[in-house]
Image (cartoon, grey):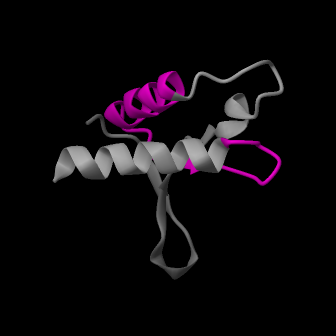
Amino acid sequence: MAQVPTVRLAGGLEICRILNGMWQVSGTHGPVDQPKAVQAMQAYVDAGLTTFDMADIYGPAEEIFGQFKRQVCTEEH
């Protein structure tokens, strides 16, 4: 995984200085191919970009992140 600069926040939380906003999967621009979105998230993580920004108005962003997390956990175990 590539090294991306990070910043330490309150409470010791460390995040990438570059965030991926999940608004792209909000569905505003048309239907979202969820498996393709999960693949794209893996490409971001492989590039060292491990911080994703979500909001309640981003439609299925949390569901897609959940799919990604389940996939990663399954592959690691």
Residue 7 visible in this rendered orientation of the protein:
yes
- 58 within the magenta span: yes
Residue 2 percent location from the top left of the image: 29, 34
Residue 19 visible in this rendered orientation of the protein:
no
Residue 4, quarter of the rendered image: top left
Q: For the point 16% across and 53% down, which residue is it?
A: 77
Residue 8 lies, with reference to residue 30, above or below; the image says below
Comparing 45 with 66, the one in front is 66
| Image quadrant where one finds the N terminus | top left
Residue 76 lies, with reference to residue 7, above or below; the image says above
Left/right placement of residue 10 relative to residue 69 reads right
Residue 27 percent location from the top left of the image: 77, 28
Q: Residue pushed farthest top? A: 30
Residue 56 percent location from the top left of the image: 78, 54
Left/right placement of residue 31 relative to residue 19 reads right
Left/right placement of residue 20 relative to residue 47 reads right
Comparing 68 with 42, the one in front is 68
Q: Which residues are magenta?
A: 35-60
Q: Residue pushed farthest bottom? A: 11
Q: For the point 32% across and 40% down, which residue is it?
A: 3
Left/right placement of residue 39 relative to residue 2 reads right
Residue 13 percent location from the top left of the image: 48, 70
- 39 within the magenta span: yes
Comparing 46 with 25, the one in front is 25
Q: For the point 36% across and 30% down, which residue is it?
A: 47
Q: How many marks?
A: 0
Residue 23, quarter of the rendered image: top right
